[in-house]
Amino acid sequence: MNIKSNAKIVGLGTYLPHKKLTNYDLEKMVDTSDEWIVRRTGVRERRLAEKEEFSSDLAIKAVENLINRYNVRINDVDMIIVTTFTPDHFAPTVAALVQGHFGIETCGTMDLNSGCTGFVYGICVADSLIATGHSNKVLVIAAEVASKVIDYSDRNTCVLFGDAAVATLIERTDEKGSFIASYFTSEGKLAQNVTCSNLSDKVNGQVLGKKRLFQQEGRSLYEYVVKNIPDAIYNLLQRSNLTFDDINWFVPHSANLRMIKAICERLNFPIEKTLLSNEYYGNTSSASIPLAIWLALEESKIKSGDKMILYGFGAGLTHGGIVLEW
């Protein structure tokens, strides 16, 4: 829908674990090669959390980076939203652990799990809380430790994923807000194509072959995304009353490069104006979109007033996006 926004993104902080897993490392673990991985996915290396390092640890360090980089205060944050499909626990939430670490009083907390679409959902929820007057300042943190649930004997998935966290601070503004339009949809009938079991080992009646390990039907997912995402992005543009000529940057979920190139070809949108994060960090699930933005900011690519399409897709199956002005 078209949004009357009075919220603005004021800063991003990141945390990337120190441990690297390169394609050459993976060559020693499974039947694969650097050439095959780069050609099929665009990934050269990824970061992995340490054994005792979890989503809350990454989230806290990303917030610390945000504070140091932008010299912002978070003691008056009204809500913390953590997007993750790899929380530390059933309970407590990752968001509650972050709030407790920083001792933020009168602050609500919630975790949000929409797989790789999570960050886009998170910033839309933040914008809505600010628009309705419930909040003046919201912290949205995408924190993922996919390595904890990856089967490193499965060459089709272990080459893809990495760990990362990005903290985004969103505040009320008296000026023009950042958010222009949004669009979300789901296809739960296909949920068995991207899974990680928990209390139940079945999805849509289908027994999952792996217990508490991530698995996906890569070919089915690829076909669904390439077929459906371009039309959804056109729908999002129509809602924003904009055309691709108005868009400075496309920021899709960095699933893999081959998939993103196929989407760009169908959209007739240049890959040079597409922001990605998977080459050196892999597929970081809900963190991939804000990580791509952070990387572009580091390279001074994004300018004030730039219009961007953020579009996520993944487990659920969920997909959705937002148009915003930086």
Image (cartoon, rainbow, N blue to C red):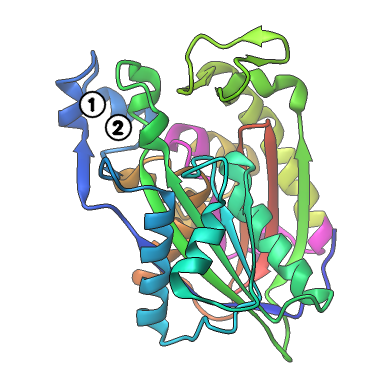
Residue under pointer 2: 38
Q: Badge 2, how many Cα within 10 Å: few under 14, some, many 20+?
A: some
- Residue at 38% x, 51% y is 164
Q: Please state the total of marks drawn on the protein image.
A: 2
Quick check: is 27 in the magenta stretch? no
Residue under pointer 1: 35
- Residue at 53% x, 48% y is 286
What is the C-alpha distance between the residues marked 2 and 1? 5 Å
Query: Which stretch is magenta?
Result: 239-260
Left or right position of 262 against 59: right
**Residue 264's image quarter?**
top right
- Rendered view: 317 above or below 152: below
Left or right position of 270 against 25: right
- Rendered view: 68 above or below 150: below
Which structural element holds mark 2?
A: helix
Left or right position of 278 against 129: left
- Tell me which amino acid carries mark 1: Glu
Taking depth in this image into account, of 180 and 189 the one nearest to the observer is: 189
Q: Which residue appears farthest toward the bottom when viewing the image?
A: 174
Q: Quadrant of the N terminus?
A: bottom right
- Residue at 57% x, 24% y is 195
Where residue 42 appears, as percent x and y from the top left, is 35, 37
- Tell me which amino acid carries mark 2: Val
Q: Is residue 85 visible?
A: yes
Q: Are marks 2 and 1 in contact (CB under 8 Å)?
A: yes
Where residue 128 appears, as percent x and y from the top left, is 78, 67
Taking depth in this image into account, of 123 and 129 the one nearest to the observer is: 129
Which structural element holds mark 1?
A: helix
- Residue at 32% x, 37% y is 43
**Residue 101's image quarter?**
bottom left
